[in-house]
Amino acid sequence: MFALSSRCLFVAAIVCSCFAVVGAVAGSAETAQIKPRQDKLRDMGGALKSIADDIKRGKLDWENTIPTNVQTIKDRGGYLLKWFPKGSGPESGVKTYALPAIWQKNDDFVKLGKAMQAEALKLDEVAATKNADAFKAQVLVIGKTCKACHDNYRSPDYEKENED
Ligand code: HEC
């Protein structure tokens, strides 16, 4: 009897430690997304800002600033929805501005992400025409798609902690 129960305990211990290992690996894979996604989002923010700066200066650089930065927004934007696996929110213990609402209202989050992607493709098309008015209008549109998501799914702490 004693021998049997200690064997059970032994088996249970192995099973438990296996689960613990699997859990830890899964956790770190999701948590590992956080820093790179913030870097890529910052690239997108920097790209949009460079374009906005050109517009403010009244000098649109159709050869360099615009195509390079439009490309960054379009390419990074295409992957955005892959950067938010479940478990990569604040519960991960890693510093993130991603709000739990992303996973609670995921359909809406995905919809906003896709809207941004569609507008980024249009931005690319408009940039190719080098029509300044149409381009400026589309920059405003894309800016609104970023804001629409940030308003609901990014913590307002981001604005408090990062002066633009
Ligand atoms: C579908 C939702 C969504 C869309 C669309 C979106 N973002 Fe974000 N963005 C987020 C979330 C969520 C975070 C917080 C990520 C984190 O802290 O882990 C974020 C963070 C950021 C950050 C801060 C990164 C940092 O930590 O320094 C910048 C900059 C940014 N986004 C720029 C943009 C720009 C520019 C666009 C549009 C071209 C855009 N985002 C579109 C959801 C979105």
Image: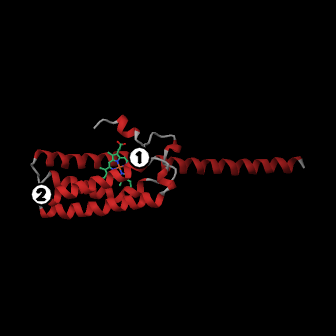
Q: Is residue 6 left or right of residue 142?
A: right
Residue topped by disc 2: 132
The residue drawn where x is 22% and y is 60% is 123
Which residue in the structure is indicated by mark 1? 154
Is 52 positioned to the left or the right of 95 in the image? left
- Colouring style: secondary structure
- Asked if residue 91 is positioned above or below residue 63 in the image, the reply reads above
Residue 105 location in percent, x, y? 49, 56
Quadrant of the image occupied by residue 74:
bottom left
| CA–CA distance in space, label 1 to label 2 | 31 Å
Q: As drawn, which residue projects farthest toward the left?
A: 59
Q: Residue at x 32, y 61 (%)?
A: 117
The answer as to whether callout 1 falls within 8 Å of ligand 1 is yes
Residue 142 vs residue 18, the one in the foreground: 142
In the rendered structure, the answer to whether residue 44 lies left or right of residue 34 reads: left
Looking at the picture, how far across and down is residue 75, in whole percent? 29, 58
Q: At label 2, which amino acid type do we have? A: Ala
Three-letter code, disc 1: Arg
